[in-house]
Image: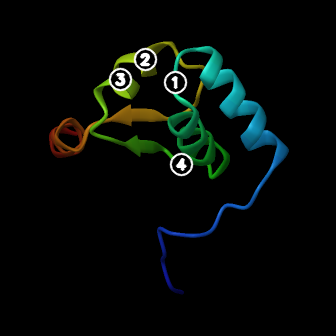
Amino acid sequence: MENSSSFEIGPAVEIDSTALVLMDLGLGEADSLHVACAVHAKSNYFVTTDDAIIKRSERLPIPLIISNPIHLLEAVRDS
């Protein structure tokens, strides 16, 4: 069985709804859509170097961890 970490996410009402909530909480339009797609895909992590997204992530009502690459690697290495 092939293991792949990429796939396409198509338009969905749930993505739009989540993106609108994230925009109301201060994320920009494109950032909200990217994070909403990650939520819809049931991702565990959203990796970014955007400090604004990381800073706001603690108050976002989403079931995934938003982290920069270095902090994520440190957390994985230490676990």
Asked if the residues shown at circle 4 and circle 1 are in contact, with their CB atoms under 8 angstroms apart, the answer is: no
Residue 56's label in the rendered image is 2
The residue indicated by pointer 4 is 43
Q: CA distance from mark 2 to mark 4?
A: 18 Å
**Whole-percent x, y for residue 16 in the image:** 75, 39
Q: CA distance from mark 1 to mark 2?
A: 8 Å
Q: Label 2 sits on what residue type?
A: Arg
Residue 4 is left or right of residue 72, and the answer is: right
Residue 66 is left or right of residue 39, and the answer is: left
**Whole-percent x, y for residue 62 in the image:** 59, 27
Q: CA distance from mark 3 to mark 4?
A: 20 Å
Asked if the residues shown at circle 2 and circle 3 are in contact, with their CB atoms under 8 angstroms apart, the answer is: yes
Q: Nearer the viewer, mark 2 or mark 3?
A: 3
Q: Nearer the viewer, mark 2 or mark 4?
A: 2
Q: Earlier in the sequence, mark 1 or mark 2?
A: 1
Q: Which residue is at a point 58% across and 33% down the rendered structure image?
A: 29
Q: Label 1 sits on what residue type?
A: Leu
Label 1 element class: loop
Asked if the residues shown at circle 1 and circle 3 are in contact, with their CB atoms under 8 angstroms apart, the answer is: yes
The residue indicated by pointer 1 is 27
Label 4 element class: loop
Asked if the residues shown at circle 1 and circle 2 are in contact, with their CB atoms under 8 angstroms apart, the answer is: yes
Q: Earlier in the sequence, mark 1 or mark 3?
A: 1
Asked if the residues shown at circle 2 and circle 4 are in contact, with their CB atoms under 8 angstroms apart, the answer is: no
The residue indicated by pointer 3 is 52
Q: Nearer the viewer, mark 4 or mark 1?
A: 1
- Foreground of the two, 1 or 63: 63
